[in-house]
Image (tube, rainbow, N blue to C red):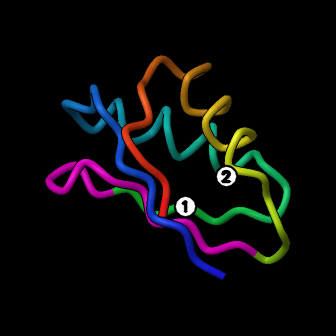
């Protein structure tokens, strides 16, 4: 299963590392971040609630615009 998360506030490689660390720490999530597209593409090995993903990104200091 895949999810695409649009993220507001990413500006540099440091941002990418913070978001990757936050998302990859979630059980069942492998994240690839695109700074240019301002999104994270998540590959899920099990069901992960959207709110868990949102909380992880917000704790890292960024805003979620959408999850599809």
Count the numbered circles shown. Answer: 2
Classified by dominant secondary structure, the portion drawn in magenta counts as strand
Residue 41 on the magenta segment: yes
Residue 39 at x, y = what percent?
33, 53
Q: Is residue 27 magenta?
A: no
Decide if residue 2 is on the left or right side of residue 37. right
Q: Position of residue 47 (x, y in %)?
A: 83, 68
Q: Which portion, as a residue range, is magenta?
A: 34-44
**Residue under label 1:** 31
Q: CA distance from mark 1 to mark 2?
A: 6 Å
Characterize the local packing of mark 1: few (<14), some (14-19) or many (20 or more) Cα atoms within 10 angstroms.
many
- Location of mark 2 (residue): 24
Q: Evaluate if marks 1 and 2 touch, with contact meaning CB atoms under 8 Å apart.
A: yes
Res. 56 image quadrant? top right
At 64% across and 65% down in the image, what residue appears? 30
Q: Residues within 10 Å of mark 2 (few under 14, many from 20)?
A: some
Q: Decide: is 30 above or below 39.
A: below
Extreme-left residue of the structure: 36
């Amino acid at each position: 299963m895949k999810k695409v998360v649009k993220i507001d506030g990413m500006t540099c490689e440091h941002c990418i590392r913070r978001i990757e660390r936050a998302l990859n720490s979630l059980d069942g999530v492998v994240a690839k971040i695109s700074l240019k597209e301002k999104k994270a593409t998540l590959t899920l090995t099990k069901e992960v609630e959207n709110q868990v993903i949102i909380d992880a990104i917000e704790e890292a200091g960024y805003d979620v615009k959408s999850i599809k």
